[in-house]
Amino acid sequence: MSGIDSEPEDPWWRRAVVYQIYPLSFADSDGDGVGDLPGITSRLDHLERLGVDVIWLSPVYPSPRDDNGYDISDYRGIDPLFGTPGDFDALLAEVHRRGMRLIMDLVVNHTSDEHPWFVASRDGGPDGPMRDWYWWRPPRPGMEPGTPGAEPNNWGSFFSGPAWTLDPRSGEYHLHLFSPRQPDLNWENPEVRRAIHGMMRWWLDRGVDGFRMDVINLISKNPELPDGHVPPGARYGDRDPHCVCGPRIHEFLADMHREVFAGHPERLLLVGEMPGVTVEEARLFTDPARREVDMVFQFEHVGLDCGPAGKFDVRPLRLTDLKASFARWQHGLAEVGWNSLYFCNHDQPRVVSRYGDDSPEHRVRSATMLATLLHLHRGTPYIYQGEELGMTNAPFAGIGDFRDIESLNHHRQEVAAGEPPERVMAALRARSRDNARTPMQWDASPGAGFTTGTPWMPVNPNHREINAAAQTADPDSVFHHYRRLIELRHTEPAVTHGDFHLLFPDSEEVYAFTRRYAAGGTELLVLVNFTGREVEVHLPEGWAGTEEVLSNVPDRGPLGSRPTLAPREARVHRRRVGR
């Protein structure tokens, strides 16, 4: 069992660790090359041994899969690609039997264009009863529908191109902040809100333990949908001031909490993914007294190595920027609020390739260093499937190897605009979401233990060396380092409750901080060498000779007052402090 002995006033999820499963790529039970629900159930022993408390399940609803399941056509069903409703119930029962919880991905900013709601909204025409379930607008005054620039405003989509698509039958456009096949729901309509609340209650009554709410801070738009400012060199106007944390977002979330969650016991976890959210806004969203969400997924730290043109404008990470960002969130949510801690998920490349060194010689040390740094901050850590093995980015040979709509759209747009194809490909190799979506590496067999058939996406060739079977048998593996980190979070109150103090803020080599919990009588020191060379550290007074709690370098001996950290070394020490 992976249960947590929480203090009475302490919400259980503050000491929890969440594990994200991307079902398409986790485990295939029937040899069709696609992951499924029985496959997940068959691998729950791995997650129980790891020690995680919550499973976050990416969408398993029926979907035409324009965006790999984040375009939902039926909120209350299970896509036959993944199995049956009975398979889902069996998975949920096995998760609960092991003392874990399961949260669903909730995608309610938009639906698929094949959802019955949108079909009725489109086919009913401008005067139809469900027209205003979505955002429909005529072309700009004086312009013919379909001509360049006739879109109702100048917003761009997150997935490239304009944020509007024309319906030739009515001559009006529908809004889509993502793919044209992901039309945005109109949350201004109370019927939309009631339908979504009813669907959420249905899943909670079925037994799920909460929701990770996809881009939930985009559901409130400025109803005027005005043009955005066009930055120099940009193709589209800045939509964010008009749709990120919009005018009614707090009202909508408080209403959701009241209508859906208030009657349920304190077993639930409510996570809001919120691109563009600030610390000040996050404090409001996660203030327990306001009853909106328990924690936020924010994106500031994973944008630090992106240039002005966005995620595919790849820049080197400056460690001082990462420290400043983390410290700002640690201090900003110290008294009120809570943050999610993550480097990887289904939308991010593999962190050991991004911020570490994924070469065979240095991958293990890099992966354990990054894990130690992340997990010992204040907040709830998230592990993305394979992260606990130190899985790496994939060796994509050409554009034909990619499946992700965002990557394919970006390549098409940039090459058409005259960018050198190899430069575009280099950015995709570094940042494409497909890096996170290669199959889970269970063993060294040809299908990596993921499937006996042909996988929907090729497995990474390095699965012969990087796999769960090899690592569970090796006490010095990345997997077992994660186990020790999770155990430390479960047993050391300073990890959950301790205050945060950043050391050496101007160092581009060492990331170090303390977590002091006076009420518990302990303080932790976390030392991380972010570089590939030895670095000497001048410690604050009182840490020499303290107890070593965790390290990714064996047999280092006692901690001196001026220790030399090995390349990518991570050390955690503990000392007693007065109450």
Image: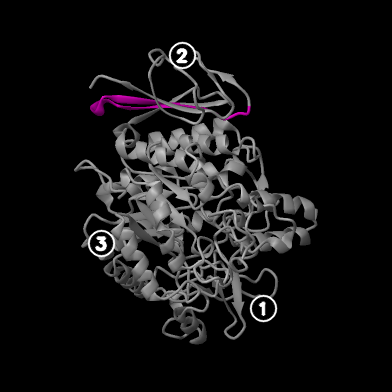
Q: Spot the residue most to the left.
A: 8
SS for callout 1: loop
Q: Callout 3 environment at 10 Å: few (<14), some (14 to 19), or many (20+)?
A: some
Three-letter amino acid code at the position of disc 1: Glu
Return the residue nearer the eye: 190 or 514: 514
Q: What is the distance, in whole Å, between disc 2 and disc 3 at their CAs?
A: 54 Å
* Range of residues picked out in magenta: 513-532
Horizontal side of residue 124 vs 146, given as left or right: left
Q: Are marks 1 and 3 in contact (CB under 8 Å)?
A: no
**Mark earlier in primary sequence (1, 3):** 1
Q: Circle 2 sits in a helix, a strand or a loop, which is it?
A: loop
User: Label 1: which residue?
Assistant: 144
Q: Residue at x 41, y 52 (%)?
A: 47
Residue contact at pointers 2 and 3, CB within 8 angstroms: no
Q: Which numbered disc flags the more N-terminal residue, 2 or 3?
A: 3
Residue 367: x, y in percent? 54, 39
The answer to the question of whether label 1 and label 2 lie on touching residues, with beta carbons closer than 8 A, is no
Please check the rendered image and state whether residue 519 is part of the magenta-colored stretch, yes or no. Answer: yes
Mark 3 secondary-structure assignment: helix
**Quadrant housing the C terminus:** top left
Q: Reply above or below: 550 against 421.
A: above
Quarter holding residue 146: bottom right
Question: Eyeballing the image, is 50 above or below 173?
Answer: above
38 drawn magenta? no
Answer with the quarter of the image where residue 205 lies: bottom left
Read off the residue under disc 3: 258
- Residue 228 coordinates in the image, percent (x, y): 57, 57
Foreground of the two, 520 or 34? 34
- The circle drawn on residue 560 is 2
Q: Amino acid at mark 2?
A: Gly
Tell me the CA gap for discs 1 and 2: 75 Å
Q: Main secondary structure of the magenta part?
A: strand
